[in-house]
Image (cartoon, helix red, strand yellow):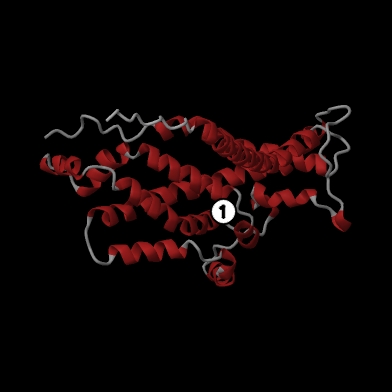
Amino acid sequence: MPAVHATPAAPAAPAAAPARRARSSRRMRRRLAADLALLTVAAAFLVPLLWLLFASVDSEASLRVEAPGSPTLDNFSAVWTDEITFTPMLNSLLMCGGAAVVTVGCAALAAYPLSRFRSRLVRPYLLTILFSTCLPITAIMVPVYGLFVQTDLIDTLYGTALFLAASQLPFAIWLLKNFMDGVPVALEEAAWTDGASWLQTLTRVILPLMGPGITVVTIYSFIMMWGNFFVPFMLLLSPDQLPASVSIFTFFGNYGSIAYGQLAAFSLLYSTPVVLLYVLIARRLGGGFALSGSVKG
């Protein structure tokens, strides 16, 4: 019988091309939608910053975002005084800087046993700490105010700094504990073999290796305290004790009148320490723990 040869099937490429074009079109639409959403979010952050820049050099600034016709530095000259800027900024630096140091120091001492000692109570304790960060500060300010009056801490910068440090301590402990978990225990055991105590091990071995973690906690704590308005507003009474976060209300006059230009200029000056803090130590955030070669088998 003669051999029967099968006829080759027709290529499916022409039928698959419309499907590929449809998938490519759907991907393009999704990508455009995502780009549009990102641009919208970026604009939401950019517009207030543009208003600050434009209003700070506009003698007739309003809530409208528009470039000034004749830029001027009169707004900065008006707020560049001891009473308006320098004294409140110094109060803020002393209060927030001292509170950040206390927060990081106490958090390191509390995070060490939570990281190194194994117990059934560690996880419930950490969850309790994390839950305490969710409590609204306004819910406890009335008893705190009464406590400060009874202990003569009212209207004192150091008393307010201690309360700010206590309010930031739970989240700082949680962060530092997680960073401390990344430091090998073998390094501590080597230090113990050389006769070091647990405090020497913490200060000379663990904390130097936790530079990025301590930097993150310090920046976060300082920024959260720097922008806190309600706590110093409640606990500080004298005008010469008020930080910059509270003295900003001097630009809000009676009957709804607001000095927008001076407010924008002061806001830029008020943001400068936080930006400088981040710029000066941001390079340490990517440094890692530098543990390569430090543990030998």
Residue toward you, 206 or 11: 11
- In percent of width and height, residue 34 lies at 61, 41
- Choose top left, top right, bottom left or bottom right for residue 283: top left
Would residue 12 be seen by someone viewing this image from the given angle? yes
Determine whether the residue tagged by mark 1 lies in a helix, strand or loop.
Answer: helix
Please name the residue shown 33% across and 56% down the image: 110
Q: Which residue is mark 1?
A: 157
> What type is the residue that disc 1 sits on?
Leu
- In percent of width and height, residue 241 lies at 64, 52
Q: Quadrant of the N terminus?
A: top left
Horizontal placement of 141 versus 207: left or right?
right
Q: Where 128 sits versus 173, above or below?
A: below
Q: Where 220 sits versus 155, above or below?
A: above
Please name the residue shown 48% across and 61% down the image: 133
- In percent of width and height, residue 119 lies at 23, 63
Would residue 80 be seen by someone viewing this image from the given angle? no
- Choose top left, top right, bottom left or bottom right for residue 2: top left
Horizontal placement of 263 versus 184: left or right?
right
Residue toward you, 253 or 15: 15
Q: Quadrant of the C terminus?
A: top left
Residue toward you, 140 or 64: 64
Please name the residue shown 39% across and 38% down the image: 212
Horizontal placement of 248 versus 292: left or right?
right
User: Dot 1 surroundings within 10 Å: few (below 14), some, or many (20 or more)?
Assistant: many
- Choose top left, top right, bottom left or bottom right for residue 130: bottom left
Residue toward you, 205 or 23: 23
